[in-house]
Amino acid sequence: MSFMSLSIYQLESGKWRADLIAFNQRKSKTFKNKNDAKRWSEIQEREFFLNFSTKQALNNKVVLTVEEALTRYMNEVSRYKKTAKKEIQRLKYYQNHLPFVDWPLVNYRPEYLKQWESSVMNRTIRPLSAASVLRDYSTLSAFFNWCRRDKGWIDFNPVENLRKPKKPEHRERRIEIDELQSILSALKYTPGTVPNTKMQQVGLIWLIAMATGMRSGEIVNRPLSDVFIAKRFIRLPDTKNGSSRNVPLDDFALHLWSLALKIDRKACPKVFTISSSSRDSLFRKARKSAGLENADLTFHDSRHEAASLMARRIKNALTLCKIFGWKDPKQALVYYNPTTDEILEELNMSKGLSSIV
C-alpha cells in the first residue's frame, strides 16, 4: 500500500528490528528472530489500517463491516431467490473464511480476495477448482454490486477488475460402461428393479439422468404430480434457467420412471424419498467403493453422457436444446462430446467422397 512503509532488518547485535510507518505514524520494535518481527509487523499493519478504515467509514457516515453487509444481503436479497438455501450457505462460508470480513466494507480491497483465492486453490486437501472460484466471484460480485448500486455503501466493486483464474475448458468426460456397472454395483442396484433402499434409489436416479439429461435436483425433487407416464413426459415448471420445460420420455426412460413410481414412499409427496445432499453423499461413497475416487467422474457427467447419446439420434440442434432446456444453441457444444469411434461410425454411415469416385 502506498501509505504504508515497512522495513525489517538485522542489527549488529544479531537481533531484528521492524520499522513500520503508516498514515504519518511510526512504530518500531526489536526481536530475537526475523519471524517474530514479521508477525508483529503484520499485526501492527492490520491495526493501523483498521483504525484508518474506521475513521474513513465514520467520515462517510457508514460504519458497516463486510460481515454485517453479507448478513444484510442474505436477509434482503438472497432469501427471496429460488436458490436461497444454497446461496445463504455460501455467503455464511464467506463470513467465516474470507480474510478481514470484520473490517469496514468501504475499505475492502481486491487483494484480500486474491489472498483467499490463493489459499483455497493451493491447499493440499480438497483445493477449489478454477470453475468453483469463478462461481464464488460471480456471487461476490453480485453482493458488492448490490452494496454499491442499491445501498450506496461503497464506490467500487472489488471483484470487477480482479485478475481471475482462467476459465477452464468445458468437460469432455464420457462415462465408460465398466464405470457405470461398477457404480451401480457399489450402490447395490440391479437395473430393471424397484429400489428398496436410498442407496439403490441413487442408482436409478443416475440411470434416469443419463436417459433423459435431467439434472440431479430435477429428478430428486420431482413431485408425483409432475410425472405424466401416459403422456410420456416429465413436467419441470421451474428450472435452473428460469423457464419451464417438458422432458420427453423414450421407451427406456419411460421404463425407468415407471420403476421409480413403484418405490415405497409412504407419505412422501416426491417420487424419490432421498434428499439432494444424501444423493450427493451416497454417490461419492459409491464412487470411492468402486475404486473410482480418482477417476475424475462426477454425477453431473451423466448430463454430458445423455447429450452425447441423444445427439446421435437427434440431428436437429434446436430439438436438443428444447429437450435440455438450453437457451443458447452453443450449449450443445459444451455437453455434446462424441468419442472418436462415434464420429467414425457416423462418417461411415455416409459414403461421402467414395460415392462419386
Image: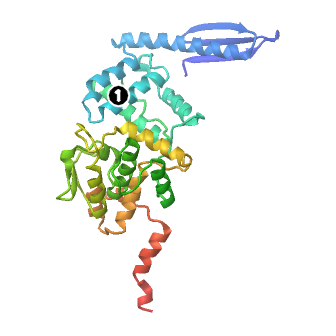
Residue 314's place in the image compared with 125, above or below, is below
Residue 280's place in the image compared with 64, above or below, is below
Residue 195's place in the image compared with 4, above or below, is below
Q: Residues within 10 Å of mark 1 (few under 14, many from 20)?
A: many
Q: Quadrant of residue 317?
A: bottom left
Residue 167 visible from this viewpoint: yes
Residue 86 % position (x, y): 35, 33
Location of the C terminus by quadrant is bottom left
How are the residues colored?
rainbow
* Of residues 153 and 135, the one drawn nearer to the viewer in this rendering: 135
* Of residues 215 and 122, the one drawn nearer to the viewer in this rendering: 215
Residue placed at 41% from the left, 43% from the top? 199
Location of the N terminus by quadrant is top right
Left or right of 24? Residue 80 is left
Residue placed at 46% from the left, 53% from the top? 171
Residue 248 % position (x, y): 24, 59
Judging from the image, what secondary structure is the residue with disc 1 in? helix
Which residue is tagged 1? 88
Left or right of 68? Residue 125 is right
Left or right of 269? Residue 160 is right
Residue placed at 45% from the left, 71% from the top? 343
Residue 17's place in the image compared with 223, above or below, is above
Q: Quadrant of residue 25?
A: top right
Residue 325 % position (x, y): 28, 53
Count of numbered circles on the image: 1
* Of residues 70 and 263, the one drawn nearer to the viewer in this rendering: 263
Residue 189 % position (x, y): 41, 51
Residue 326 visible from this viewpoint: no
